[in-house]
Amino acid sequence: ALVNTKEMFKKAYEGGYSIGAFNISDLEQLQAVLEACKSRNSAVIIQASKSAISYAGMDTLVAMVKAASEEIGVDCALHLDHGPSFEVAKKCIDAGFTSVMIDGSHLDYEENVAITKQVVEYAHQHNVSVEAELGVLAGVEDEVSSDVHKYTEPDQAVDFVNRTGVDSLAIAIGTSHGAFKFKGEANLRFDILEEIQGKLPNFPIVLHGASAVDPESVATCNKFGGDIAGAKGVPVDMLRKASSMAVCKINMDTDLRLAMTAAIRKFLAENPSAFDPRKYIGAGKEAIKATVEGKIDVVLGSKDSL
Ligand code: G3H
Ligand code: 13P
Ligand code: NA
Ligand code: ZN
């Protein structure tokens, strides 16, 4: 069944672990994530961006997630990732999502407060959880891009949470989206996370842009015809440390994309006569499943949280 994030965040906060939030846009990615979480008995958030929803079709996506959750036997939250407007968030809530993000991080502060309040008011009437974002991650966020990090300001985070009534908050501490996160050494501002945690006790924090960008996936892509240069992700020990702190939701998309692409490239290169999509997409699915199991074990610490 589909559930909201309230219970899972409460348990994650108290238990010093995080729930994985994995982006999906098709059947096999969805099955891979749910099967991995079933095998680890782990709570999970399935998330889809506006563009992923357009790709799959709103009603198809919601029906597919509900059915797969029942058939595989794992409860999950269905979450809108980077909701760009009240209208999109409302559409998702009306269609059956159990959690939505309203991303007003690129607006000015008062506008971010206002749009977040508007979404919270509608969502809470429908028992749907709301995530907002304060601070700006460098790199591309759906349709908007920024060259520099605008780190979250702790006192502003306190004001924002109090005024909006939001259920969780994504913060900027140095991560970014995609496969190219750091030019030099990886560095996360744990001092900012610690300060926010101190000022907002028991409040769940969300970390976006948290793929580790597994060098093995990148190498396999490149070995079998790919061309991905200079990729760099967040070191796994930093992610585990964040999980043990106020961070209760860790977003990963890039690592699943890379794992699937690497496995499909390899399968097709090694099986030139194959043309049954179930065979090569199936190889991609198995790779995502193994990736998600690894995240639960090494990054999230969410085993047996269901
Ligand atoms: O944060 C963005 C997610 O990785 C989703 O990306 O808009 O290409 O689906 P997308
Ligand atoms: P990655 O690009 O690091 O996987 O982050 C995904 C994300 O934050 C989705 O909201
Ligand atoms: Na945590
Ligand atoms: Zn994100």
Image: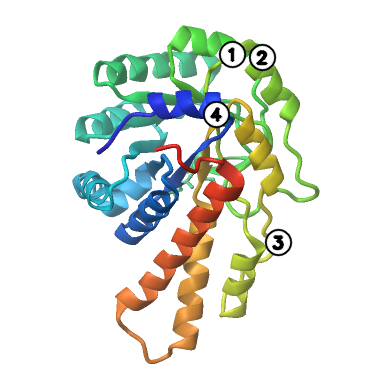
Q: Quadrant of residue 177?
A: top right
Residue 205 appears in the rendering: no
Where does residue 261 sit, x and y in percent of width and height? 49, 68
Label 4 residue near ligand 3, CB within 8 Å: yes
What element does badge 4 sit on? helix
Residue 230's disc is 3
Kindly check if marks 4 and 3 are in contact, taking CB atoms under 8 A apart as contact: no
Residue at the disc numbered 4: 15
120 or 305: nearer the viewer? 305
Viewer-side label of 4, 3: 4
Q: From mark 3 to mark 2, how far is it between C-alphas?
A: 36 Å
Kindly check if marks 1 and 2 are in contact, taking CB atoms under 8 A apart as contact: yes
* Image vertical order of residue 118 relative to residue 281, above or below: above
Residue in the image at 56% along x and 80% along y: 224
Quick one: label 1 or label 3, which is nearer the N terminus?
Answer: 1
Describe residue 97's horizontal placement relative to residue 41 as left or right. Answer: left
Residue at the disc numbered 2: 198
Residue in the image at 52% along x and 58% along y: 291
Viewer-side label of 4, 2: 4
Residue in the image at 45% along x and 74% along y: 264
Viewer-side label of 4, 1: 4
Where does residue 233 sit, x and y in percent of width and height? 66, 51
Quick one: label 4 or label 1, which is nearer the N terminus?
Answer: 4
189 or 75: nearer the viewer? 75
Badge 1 amino acid? Pro
Badge 4 amino acid? Gly
What element does badge 1 sit on? loop
Badge 2 amino acid? Gly
Q: From mark 1 to mark 2, how far is it between C-alphas?
A: 6 Å
Label 3 residue near ligand 2, CB within 8 Å: no
Where does residue 25 sit, x and y in percent of width and height? 35, 53
Residue at the disc numbered 1: 201
